[in-house]
Amino acid sequence: MEKHIRLPLTEETARSLHAGDTVYLTGTIYTSRDAGHKRMCEALEKGQPLPFDPADSVIYYVGPTPAKPGQVIGSAGPTTSGRMDAYAPAMLSVGARGMIGKGARLPQVIEAMKKYSGVYFGATGGAGALLARCIKKSELIAYEDLGAEALRKLYVEDMPLVVIIDSEGRNLYEEGRAAYLKHHKK
Amino acid sequence: MIEKLCIEANQQLPKDVRQALRCCRRQEDWEIAQGVLDQIIENSEIARQEQVPICQDTGMACVFLEIGQDVHITGGALSEAVDEGVRRGYERGYLRKSVVKDPLRRENTGDNTPAMLYTEIVPGTHITVSVVPKGFGSENMSAIRMFKPSHGLSGIKDFILETVEAAGPNPCPPMVVGVGIGGTFDKAALLAKKALIRPIDSSHPDPFYRDLETEMLEKINELGIGPQGFGGRTTAIGLNIETMPTHIAGMPCAVNISCHVTRHQTEVI
């Protein structure tokens, strides 16, 4: 199914999304990858606040290229999500609801998604130039010293995504491949 | 020249990769896979027209120099000159600086140096310079194994399929697969990397390996992983094998995985 979603990502909206849905996302999202997640989780452990309000937020696993003059942001496709698996359950537990990335997730992340009604979206890996076109605003909000890994607040319009894992734990990587193989063995 | 090649390689997909993507799109009959391939092709066209990086992972700069043995290089250290080219290319081309100084302590070098430099002395009076920006989403899914000769051809075939299977959706499929067989532990890995640089519309000169390339690409595209792992025929758009002699006791095999943004630019001085 094709769906147009406006952020924030409420629990109700999250639960209405299913693995395999094509989603066009509009609203504010936050960027973070390896080093940013490490810092945020260290802050959570110390009881310190995060640089943004995690409630109903969507985090995009991306380290963009530097913007050329006149550009909002450089190329900005997803990075491999599995490297954030160590941190994702903690982020979900404080209210972060959506994750945008590419690649497989560990069972403990999927369990946390079921518990907290999280959604894992896939953006097309390697399509950094195309995805940058959906990003209308970009603002650096924390961890500037991390360069490409700094935390950014983005405003996106109709960002093309696919639901890979939904809040019930259904997984497009398994179901999509099985459906293709079943169809071609007939 | 290295500056220019770093920028061009990151903005322009080589012709062989562009053709392979279009060819796979024509052959793909699964709807979600067609949509992903369309996005990938459109993305590379946007990057070329707007002169922006195809992918935000502009890679580690792997630089291969084939230096003619009659060439005399003056005016400073060669490796410093290569690093200076990479430094300028990544700064002036608005490319991402993705290199850390130390593998465990992880502080960014800030200029994407050092380059991963390989030099080879060849006959002649020219230098052939190839710049290969290598992203790590796919690099991380690569593997090497020291086989016993008794494992034979079937051992190698299983290993290639196992490595692609384990990579699954992570390396941004459709992938390009580089296989290195023979030599020593280190040489097998280098052969696999070199296999990725060879145009994907070329074949191994030995018919035995040419047929193995065709067979393994077909087997990979029967796995059903598909573009981005969402299911489909197009799991890989190319597979090259490079080989060299090895020891009577061994059969090293390395599989270097690359993505649909397999970049390389070459020029001759």
Image (spheres, rainbow, N blue to C red):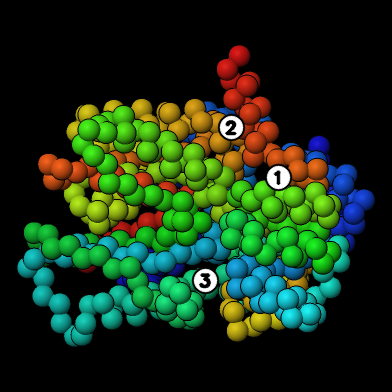
**Residue contact between numbered discs 3 and 2, judged by CB atoms under 8 Å:** no
Give me the residue at 51% from left, 31% from top.
Answer: B223
In the picture of the structure, the residue carrying the numbered disc 3 is B96
- Disc nearest the viewer among 2 and 1: 1
In the picture of the structure, the residue carrying the numbered disc 1 is A164
- Helix, strand, or loop for circle 3? loop
Q: Is residue B42 visible?
A: no
Residue nearest the viewer, comparing A105 with A102: A105
In the picture of the structure, the residue carrying the numbered disc 2 is B232
The amino acid beneath tag 2 is Gly
- For disc 1, the neighbor class at 10 Å (few under 14, some 14 to 19, many from 20) is many
- For disc 3, the neighbor class at 10 Å (few under 14, some 14 to 19, many from 20) is many
Give me the residue at 70% from left, 40% from top.
Answer: A171
- Disc nearest the viewer among 3 and 2: 2
**Residue contact between numbered discs 2 and 1, judged by CB atoms under 8 Å:** no
Count all numbered tags in the image, as a single digit: 3
- Disc nearest the viewer among 1 and 3: 1
Give me the residue at 45% from left, 81% from top.
Answer: B109
Q: Is residue B57 visible?
A: yes
Q: CA distance from mark 1 to mark 3?
A: 27 Å
Q: Is the N terminus of chain B in the top left, top right, bottom left or bottom right quadrant? A: bottom left
Residue A31, position as x, y percentages in the image = 70, 68
- For disc 2, the neighbor class at 10 Å (few under 14, some 14 to 19, many from 20) is many
**Chain under disc 2:** B
Q: CA distance from mark 3 to mark 2?
A: 31 Å
Residue A163, position as x, y percentages in the image = 74, 45
- Helix, strand, or loop for circle 2? loop
Q: Is the C terminus of chain B in the top left, top right, bottom left or bottom right quadrant? A: bottom left
